[in-house]
Amino acid sequence: PLPTARRAHKWFLWCEPGLQFALLGQVLLCFFERPAWCATTEAPCISGEAIYPLFGLPMLSRWEALAVESFLLGLLAGRVALEVTYLGFDRYKSSQSHRFSGSLLLLAIADCIASVLT
């Protein structure tokens, strides 16, 4: 293997435990974001007839949530970049799970960009 690929693999192995927390952070972020249909108001969140349960958790502002999400997505994109570096793009894209997770990551990044622009 190329020295760059070997170095990227060592970085990947060193970063992998922290990157698992980035995935967990993406899931947990949903509990601290205001739902999209009431993100522009500070009034109680009403969905149809019922009030949306917020469970008393502190809510992040729109920009705080975007900052956290951007940071976590950046970490996950770095993970993909390291994998592509040490595996090679052809080998990376040959795996169905890599194609699927890469596609989901691209959609999440596009969603984050769309949130900033709107």
Image (cartoon, rainbow, N blue to C red):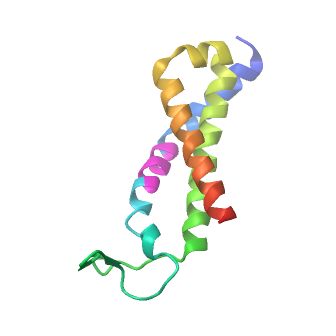
Image coordinates of residue 14 in percent, x first then y, are 57, 37
Q: Residue at x 56, y 53 (%)?
A: 72
- The quarter of the picture where residue 3 lies is top right
Count of numbered badges drawn on the protein? 0
* Image height of 52 relative to 108, above or below: below
Q: Is residue 19 magenta?
A: yes
Residue 52 seen: yes
- Residue 35 horizontal side relative to residue 14, left or right: left
Give whichever of 12, 44 is nearer the camera: 44
- The quarter of the picture where residue 5 lies is top right
Residue 88 seen: no
* Quadrant location, the N terminus: top right
Residue that protrudes farthest toward the right in the picture: 3
Q: Residue at x 56, y 43 (%)?
A: 107
* Image height of 96 relative to 35, above or below: above
* Quadrant location, the C terminus: bottom right
Residue that protrudes farthest toward the left in the picture: 50
Image: magenta residue range: 18-26
Image coordinates of residue 29 in percent, x first then y, are 44, 62
Residue that protrudes farthest toward the bottom in the picture: 43
Residue that protrudes farthest toward the front in the picture: 48
* Image height of 117 relative to 95, above or below: below
* Image height of 116 relative to 77, above or below: below
- Residue 53 horizontal side relative to residue 117, left or right: left
Image coordinates of residue 10 in percent, x first then y, are 62, 28
Q: Residue at x 52, y 25 (%)?
A: 98
Give whichever of 99, 110 is nearer the camera: 110
Q: Is residue 15 magenta?
A: no
Magenta: main secondary structure: helix
Q: Residue at x 29, y 75 (%)?
A: 52
- The quarter of the picture where residue 91 lies is top right
